[in-house]
Amino acid sequence: MATQADDWGNQPSGGEEAGDRHVSIIGVLAIQGSYREHCAALRRCGVQAIEVRKAEQLTRVSGLIIPGGESTTMANVAERNGLIAALRGFAQSGKPMWGTCAGLIFLANRATGQKKGGQALLGGLDCKVHRNFFGSQINSFETELPVPSHFPAKSPDHFRAIFIRAPGILEVGEGVEVLAECPVPEGMVVPTAEVDEGMMVIPTAVDVDKDKIHAPREPTTAPSCGDNHSRDKVIVAIRQGHLLGTAFHPELTSDLRWHLLFLDMVRCSNPKTIPMEEVEEEGALAAGGGGGEEGGKKADSARAATTTTASFTFPSMCRPEDLPIFREERNMEFELI
Amino acid sequence: MNYSYFPIRKAFAADFTAKVTSVAKDCAEPRITKTVKQILDRAMRKAMEKSIPIIKSEYNYCMSLVRRDAHRRCGGSAWEIDKNGWFLNWTLITALDRVIVRLIGCYRVVITTLDGVIVLLIGWLIASLTGGWSEGGGRGGSPWVVLSLAIMSSTNGIVVTHEDVAAAKLKPSMAVGKATFSVKVGLAQMLKGGVIMDVVNVEQARIAEEAGAVAVMALERVPADIRRHGGVARMSDPQMIREIKKAVTIPVMAKARIGHFVEAQILEAIGIDYIDESEVLTPADDVNHINKRNFQVPFVCGCRNLGEALRRIAEGAAMIRTKGEAGTGDIVEAVRHVRAVMGDIRRLQSMDEDELYVFAKELRASYELVKQTKVLGRLPVVNFAAGGVATPADAALMMQMGCDGVFVGSGIFKSGDPRKRASAIVQAVTHFDDPKILAEVSCDLGEAMVGINCFDKGLERYAARSE
């Protein structure tokens, strides 16, 4: 256990002894977007995932993923259901949250390039995010990026990153750890940090209760990332305390390492919850995908059988299994995991 | 083939297995190890029992697996192999191996016959004359190297494989893949669980965005008006689409006529996010659809049954919707189409593998896609409902039947209170399985769009315009 924690670059907190090991539940905000992909990835990691649609469901989960999707839609629906306050409370309680793409915008303190009138943000990540940084769908792309140093040493040193109308992180404050940067595609007109039309600023975490809106802060030049403003690269993954934000979509690839990183954050914040060694046994660190020999369902059920300490109850759905993960775009081959 | 080399082969197989195992352990990919192991075991058993050489095709199959494994781990890009013609890492295990490895740098070769050694030496000679070997470094080399090695491996029982993972890792491919199928499907995946609304001007687009639409479909007339006015319905004015694009931050879709690839090119040029090759517009080609693989921009297409859906996917569609009967406000056709698709998938799942060929013939769809669908238990791309959705209940019905999201055409802006209805339908799609919330959002929405009963005689069937 302890060495595993070191591998992931986190300090193992107390209570690591193999005692009562509860299977913790990770929630995925299921308002809209790629929540089922996230749930599938979490199940492949051997933990239970539930779809969170209502405030009361938040009490059951020990970590929350805000998936990719349309951030305006998510903010809109969440606001109408009174979920925003519950989510802010969740973030303040110190439980880990991870936002991919739209979720990153949600978690950012400041966002630009939004719709007229702005949108509700949860805040917490001290950074400035530009919506649709890379442009519209025609500029969406996938690439390989070097992994952050927290990833296990034995795993591949690159990961597949899929950017879909993705945001970019323009500035980060002090104490924000930059996990990944992406070279800006050639010939792209780069949105600058100065464009403040439709800018939404949300209060810093300390001031959330007072619900007052601050003026945008002066951009702080963090010493950890000196080329904060150089625009041949843009920051695409950050971590601050219990919050993780990625501009790309790990849930659309078969690489589970980002999910494992998040699970590790959950484990460190609440040490007696996730049985990590079972994940290792599964060999889930592989960035690659399957040989396509086994059916997805079969693999899923096999995993569920090997990883449970308590019996899992997946939400019974009349809806079919989830989408494949595509690799070979020419003949549209897919991988089943 | 000379049987006296059998002991070498045996040694090779053992060594090869060990290497593959260690490599696979390194990348923690148990399944591929298992497959390679099984093949090798079988080959070994055959060789032992009948004392025949290990069959070359089995070697080649092992090799292809290992290569696939290798290229995945060195960056995952298939082009890596295509560009260089070969994945240049080699394994060598005969007595000569150390010598030859010294000679040719990091390449390693497995030799199973004596002829192989000779050809290798010839190849090496050619390569050194052309300067290919001196480049070293685990990749590249002149075309001569590639050619000579390819000839060797294909004719002389030489098995090539990679070994030096570290060398492969040094130069990962950082190539940017634009408009790959996963990127195209990716946007559709981000739209899942959402509502896409038809809008005809900037004001409506703003209302849709405020209500929580995940995307808007920009068109000149909503289907209900197309139905009323008749005539030929075409692609919208690009200027209008541009304005809508400027006004909202959510993705903007637009419709092109079936088979009208120039309209699609125009829409691509103005940077639209998704193109709907739609039967609602008057078809431009009554036989062929657009070859959607030629485009960078992703396409969504309508379908009435599984065969039609798979034919569109084969043409390159990255998203599927039911056709329904647009502009009627009658959900019956959409239900029929979802039932047809889902029913066919359920039948498919209970079928024997042997029956798939005939089923693919009946569906008039590609066998490969039929097989993929069977394995997945769903369409291999995102599947939305469209055509006749007018109330929150309609939208939730489509979601409960297994759709990933909903298109609403005339249902919103032909109703009494578009703002309220739009936001109610958005809520209904999120909470599709919670009747209490559905009841709440369905209250007091004002007048719904005037419907046209789909069983009316004389109703023009848009859905039947293409197949």
Image (spheres, grey):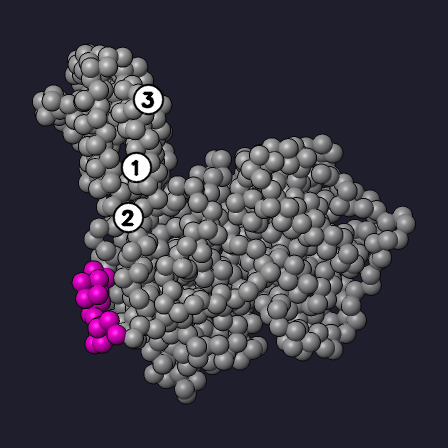
Does dot 3 land on a helix, a strand or a loop? loop
Position of residue B126 measured from the top left corner of the image (x, y, whole percent)? 20, 13
Say which residue appears at 57% left-offset and 62% top-offset: A317
Position of residue B150 measured from the top left corner of the image (x, y, whole percent)? 30, 19
Find disc 1 in the rendering and name its residue.
B37
Q: Is A81 positioned to the left or the right of B388 in the image?
A: left
Q: Earlier in the sequence, mark 3 or mark 2?
A: 2
The Cα–Cα distance between marks 1 and 2, rounded to whole angstroms, is 15 Å
From this viewpoint, which residue is outermost toward the front? B49
Q: What's under tag 3, amino acid-wise?
A: Ile
Does dot 1 land on a helix, a strand or a loop? helix
Say which residue appears at 36% left-offset and 81% top-offset: A93
Q: Any mark on residue B55, and which?
A: 3
Find disc 2 in the rendering and name its residue.
B28
Residue A14 magenta-drawn? Answer: yes
Q: What's under tag 2, amino acid-wise?
A: Ala
Residue A47 magenta-drawn? Answer: no
Q: What's under tag 1, amino acid-wise?
A: Lys
| Part of the protein shown in magenta | A1-19
